[in-house]
């Protein structure tokens, strides 16, 4: 069911419906995404109370406590039943009022009330308690709704310094009009789209474009909301209202993309649609049909058999085996640094055929490092001392990467350093004139640059000393240590297609893609471009797409893809909140392990389903023939549930070696 579009202003007071909240415990969960973490101990109180009452009652039955008989016994077990049974009965009645007659709530209600009707009070409580515990396990696995976009408020600019009446005042960005002048300090987010009024500015646009390198903007050029001012106080003139700004557009895409993702139903719900009405009608038939075929038909006797039949047919073993299997898978994944936000995504991971990944921060470390140093007619160490002397006072990320170089001996000192707008630096080191910057800086000073530099796609810092080209340094975003291994393992897990989509320059994206051996890559993409590319892939028949990203700009695609995977260590809060799966260690090689864990979990789930259904079918036949008593039925049910638990626990012991 599609979700209503949420007004961000009202997000604190609205519930974003859970995409994957498959099984809701009636009474124990009011339908809001409170989660076990928030509800705490109170969530378990009904089940704990019923369990204590049940054990105490069984103990008094066993030791034949004198006062524990007749109405005392009925009241005791009735009180034990109410905390776990009443919410289910209530849910069953509400379903009937909505026209949904045959639900597992109805079957559980009839079966357990039937157990009370024939005097099997402990069994009635035990069966309902099993059901409640199964639902609690499922709730614990999916206690937070994946689509809770409240975290988006953390990245949305919440104030703007606007010039009004010759004074800068702080206001809500939504109240700023087009054409007003806004001041942005160092480290603050640009609140609205506009044009730069200051001479220049350096902005981190990773939230919007995925570009790993800060963007230098000149006066009169466009700046976008959500970008972070990296250097000096700047002024902008707004060109759009907040609701039309870049960051607001991304928020809107996240909402709409999330709404396009359909709700996954747990297997037991689908199965119950067929199973429950069949069982109910068979029980009715078992009560009345023998009248036409049996000579000594006794209504009470066949009613007793029918109620036993209903108790036997209670789906508690099925209900508990499935969430426990998923719970085991979720636990195993967590131990391996992988957080699944719901049981359904374990299933979805097994169906993935195409893996699409972002570049910056996903397969690269998202930090600049020196990749190569080429000194011409200079010793490398001395060449780097000249360069480091010029870059020492700069706070630019490229300068920081250069300053990490370790050179022996005494450092050089630069004097008379001046900045040449858009080109680089000029200064004096050891009495020599030094130029540091890009190719336009070199050519404007009539310095010949080697042609080999034309083929370099990464960031390059060129150096000239005393009017002669002295060399260059290549600065690049470094691949993560396990990046190559990740691609290898993903292919070994059976994924047919691996694609890279990035907001970084296409030339850099293509080079990284070639180095890693991905099938296809495209760079220079805005968030909406990435979303369009992924939606094209998803439109292909039988193609299940997993997208891996880490930035705010990846959030719309993470929400829209079949499985959204976020890097949780350095990833943005929005990406983490929007994604279905979180790689807590930031290692892309964990993706293949997530697929393996999903497949192991699915295999164990179906083993549990087969076991529960097989035993249930046999005992149902015996019950219908009067060969199985209530105790035997409950014993068979509990036995299957215990076997399912042991089978699910195996997931915690498995080792998914790479």
Image (spheres, helix red, strand yellow):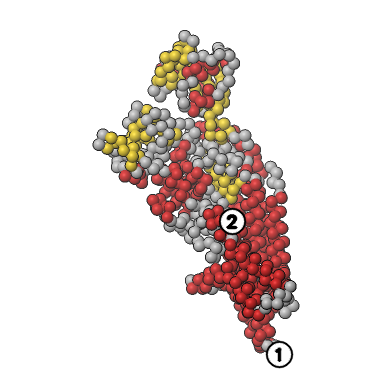
Residue furthest to the front in view is 67
- Name the disc covering residue 452, or none: none
Decide which of tag 1 and tag 2 comes sooner along the chain: 2
Tell me which corner region of the image, top left, top right, bottom left or bottom right, holds residue 364.
top right
Residue at 68%, 88% in the rendered image? 298
- Residue at the far left: name it: 165
Viewer can see residue 520: no
In the rendered structure, the answer to whether residue 497 lies left or right of residue 414 reads right
Residue 654 image position (x, y, % from top left): 71, 49
Name the residue nearer the viewer: 658 or 646.
646
Residue under numbered circle 1: 296
Task: Identify the residue at image location x=53%, y=41%.
Answer: 571
Whether 416 is drawn above or below 592: the answer is: above
- Above or below, comparing residue 528 to residue 313 in the picture: above
- Crowd around label 2: few <14 · some 14–19 · many ≥20 (10 Å): some
Residue on which disc 2 sits: 140
Identify the residue at image location x=28%, y=35%. 167
Residue 248 placement: quadrant: top left
């Amino acid at each position: 069911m599609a979700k209503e579009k949420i007004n961000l202003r009202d997000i604190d007071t609205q519930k974003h419906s859970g995409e994957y909240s498959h099984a809701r415990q009636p009474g124990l969960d009011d339908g809001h995404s409170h989660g076990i973490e928030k509800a705490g101990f109170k969530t378990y109180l009904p089940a704990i109370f019923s369990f204590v009452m049940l054990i105490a009652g069984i103990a008094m039955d066993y030791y034949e406590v004198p006062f524990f008989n007749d109405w005392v016994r009925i009241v005791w077990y009735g009180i034990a039943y109410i905390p776990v049974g009443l919410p289910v009965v209530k849910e069953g009645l509400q379903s009937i009022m909505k026209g949904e007659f045959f639900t597992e709530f109805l079957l559980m209600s009839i079966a357990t009330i039937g157990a009370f009707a024939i005097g099997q009070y402990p069994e009635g409580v035990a069966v309902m308690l099993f059901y409640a515990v199964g639902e609690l396990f499922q709730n614990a696995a999916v206690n937070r709704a994946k689509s809770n976009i409240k975290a988006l408020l953390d990245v949305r600019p919440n104030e703007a310094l606007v010039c009004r009446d010759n004074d800068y005042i702080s206001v809500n960005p939504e109240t700023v009009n087009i054409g007003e002048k806004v001041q942005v300090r160092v480290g603050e987010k640009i609140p609205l789209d506009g044009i730069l009024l200051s001479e220049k500015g350096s902005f981190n646009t990773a939230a919007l474009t995925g570009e790993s390198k800060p963007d230098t903007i000149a006066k009169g050029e466009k700046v976008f909301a959500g970008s972070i001012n990296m250097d000096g106080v700047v002024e902008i003139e707004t060109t759009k209202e907040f609701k039309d700004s870049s960051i607001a557009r991304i928020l809107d895409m996240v909402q709409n993309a999330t709404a396009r993702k359909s709700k996954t139903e747990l297997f037991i719900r689908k199965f119950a649609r067929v199973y429950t009405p069949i069982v109910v009608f068979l029980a009715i038939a078992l009560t009345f049909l023998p009248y036409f075929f049996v000579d000594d038909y006794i209504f009470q006797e066949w009613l007793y058999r029918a109620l036993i039949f209903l108790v036997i047919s209670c789906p508690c073993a099925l209900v508990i085996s499935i969430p426990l299997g998923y719970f085991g898978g979720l636990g195993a994944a967590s131990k391996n640094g992988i957080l699944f936000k719901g049981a359904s995504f374990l299933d979805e991971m097994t169906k993935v055929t195409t893996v699409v990944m972002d570049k910056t921060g996903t397969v690269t470390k998202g930090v600049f490092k020196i990749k190569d140093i080429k000194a011409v007619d200079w010793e490398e160490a001395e060449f780097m001392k000249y360069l480091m002397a010029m870059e020492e006072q700069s706070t630019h990320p490229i300068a920081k990467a250069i300053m990490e170089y370790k050179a022996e001996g005494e450092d050089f000192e630069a004097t008379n350093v001046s900045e040449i707008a858009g080109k680089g630096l000029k200064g004096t080191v050891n009495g020599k004139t030094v130029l540091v910057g890009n190719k336009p800086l070199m050519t404007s000073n009539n310095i010949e640059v080697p042609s080999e530099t034309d083929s370099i796609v990464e960031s390059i810092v060129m150096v000239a000393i005393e009017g002669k080209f002295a060399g260059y340094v290549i600065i690049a975003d470094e691949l993560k240590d396990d990046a190559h291994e990740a691609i290898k393992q993903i292919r070994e897990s059976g994924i047919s297609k691996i694609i890279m989509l990035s907001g970084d320059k296409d030339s850099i994206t293509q080079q990284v893609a070639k180095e890693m051996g991905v099938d296809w890559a495209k760079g220079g993409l805005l968030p909406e471009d990435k979303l369009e590319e992924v939606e094209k892939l998803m439109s292909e028949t039988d193609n299940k797409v997993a997208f891996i990203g880490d930035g705010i700009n990846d959030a719309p695609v993470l929400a829209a893809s079949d499985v959204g995977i976020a890097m949780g260590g350095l990833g943005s809060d929005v990406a983490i909140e929007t994604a279905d799966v979180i790689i807590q260690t930031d290692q892309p090689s964990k993706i293949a392990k997530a697929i393996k864990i999903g497949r192991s979990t699915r295999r164990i789930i179906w083993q549990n389903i087969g076991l529960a259904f097989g035993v249930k079918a046999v005992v149902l036949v015996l019950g219908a023939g009067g060969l199985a008593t209530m105790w035997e039925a409950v014993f068979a049910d509990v036995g299957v549930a215990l076997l399912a638990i042991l089978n699910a626990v195996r997931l915690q012991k498995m080792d998914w070696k790479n």
